[in-house]
Image: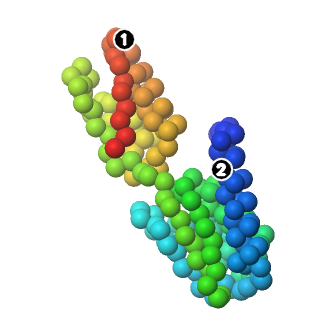
Amino acid sequence: MVRPVSCMHRFVVAFCLFVSLLMASSAHADAFIISKIKIEGLERLPDGTLLNYLPVGVGDPMDESQVIFSISELYKTGFFTDIKLLRDDTTLIVRVNERPSIADVTFDGNSDIDDDALNKALLDIGVTRGQIFNRSLLDKLSQELERVYFSQGKYGVKIKTEVT
């Protein structure tokens, strides 16, 4: 399913690519062969996951176009809020900030519908612990909870979400 990309998202990606290009043109003016890849900033994702999405590897040439392409491919995963590719001699340093993930979903003030039924409804729409969090997911979660309550005849329900 193809999701529309918001103007703000496009602006952020374009801005990051522009900044990376500037950094690449000054810090990475000369192409080099990658002898080692060092990853910084991962908290939950394994290094292997990032390396699977990184379109270059040890032994590959790295130039300005590869920097831009690599950053773009990593952003497409949706796992990161910030990505920087740096060079230390022939070592490629991938510095990232991960998006937050869902640690838990709790229900407060719920006495009408069993928590297990609500958790099943969330699981049915793909909301699980460890999943990358984003605002659209929170909206989807709220809509699904409303749907469950409405299907039980609880039309006066108010869903309040809180991110901590």
Q: Label 2 sits on what residue type?
A: Val
Element class at badge 1: loop
Residue 75 spot, x, y in % from top left: 62, 57
Image height of 104 relative to 79, above or below: above
**Could you tell which of marks 1 and 2 lies nearer the N-terminus?**
2
Q: Is residue 80 visible?
A: yes
Which secondary structure lies at badge 2?
helix
The picture places residue 153, in percent across and down from the top left corner, at 34, 11
Q: Where residue 155 is drawn, which disc sits there?
A: 1
Residue at x 64%, y 54% (from the top left corner)? 76
On screen, residue 111 versus residue 94, left or right, reads left
Q: Count residues near mark 2 (Cα–Cα under 10 Å), then give few for <14, some for 14-19, many for 20+.
A: few
Check residue 57 in the rendering and tell me which mark sits there, or answer none: none
Quarter of the N terminus within the rendering? top right
Q: For residue 30, what is the image quadrant?
A: bottom right
Q: Quadrant of residue 15?
A: bottom right
Q: Residue at x 50, y 39 (%)?
A: 135
Looking at the image, can residue 72 be seen? no
For badge 1, the amino acid type reads Tyr
Residue at left offset 72%, top offset 53%: 14
**Residue indicated by mark 2:** 12
- Between residue 120 and residue 89, name the one nearer to us: 89
Residue under the point 66% across and 64% down: 71
Does the residue at mark 1 contact the one at mark 2 (Cβ under 8 Å)?
Answer: no
- How far apart marks 1 and 2 lie (CA) works out to 39 Å
Q: Is residue 131 above or below residue 37?
A: above
Q: Nearer the viewer, mark 1 or mark 2?
A: 2
Residue 8 placed where, x, y %?
65, 42
The location of residue 118, given as percent across then percent down, is: 32, 30
Above or below, comparing residue 143 to residue 157 in the picture: below
Which part of the image, by quadrant, shows the C terminus?
A: top left
Binning the other alpha carbons within 10 Å of mark 1 as few (below 14), some (14 to 19) or many (20 upward) gives few
